[in-house]
Amino acid sequence: MVKRSWLAVSHFAWERLGIDPDTGVVPDGVESQTVRALLNLSVIVEAAGSSMADLAKTTTMHGNVKDYYSTHGIYAGRNTSPPPAQFLRLKNGE
């Protein structure tokens, strides 16, 4: 079992969208946007001196619950074991 140590300080990275920061373009498709969003998040986390393996919780937001299954597979494949807790929010509270 992997033990995680809890820090007294929390860091938040809000709204890490799947936008390419170099071009400002949003890739086509929820899968490509998920990959880009995770890359964007990892850059921020690593710049703060941490890593994706240190994440305790993430929240994903979707306009359609069907997108969750696609994004969850990508998310699960890019995280360490055990993965951080993942919460799902639907646009407009659907």
Image: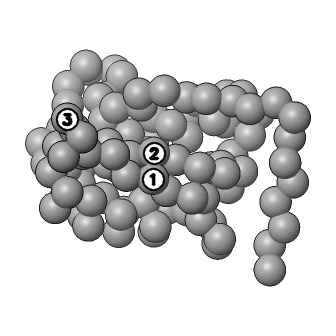
**Horizontal and vertical percent for residue 43?**
56, 34
Residue at the image point whose x is 30% and y is 36% from the top: 18
Q: Quadrant of residue 92?
A: top left
Q: Amino acid at mark 1?
A: Phe
Residue 83 located left or right of residue 94: right
Q: Earlier in the sequence, mark 1 or mark 2?
A: 2
Whether residue 33 is visible here, answered yes or no, is: no
* Near-viewer residue (63 or 71): 63
Q: Kindly identify which residue carries mark 1.
A: 87
**Horizontal and vertical percent for residue 65?**
20, 57
Dot 1 surroundings within 10 Å: few (below 14), some, or many (20 or more)?
few
Badge 3 element: helix
- Is 67 placed above or below 62 here? below
- Which of discs 1 and 3 lies nearer the camera? The answer is 3
Q: Earlier in the sequence, mark 1 or mark 3?
A: 1
Q: CA distance from mark 1 to mark 2?
A: 5 Å
Residue at the image point whose x is 46% and y is 67% from the top: 76
**Horizontal and vertical percent for residue 10?**
74, 32
Whether residue 80 is visible here, answered yes or no, is: yes
Q: Earlier in the sequence, mark 2 or mark 3?
A: 2
Q: Amino acid at mark 2?
A: Thr
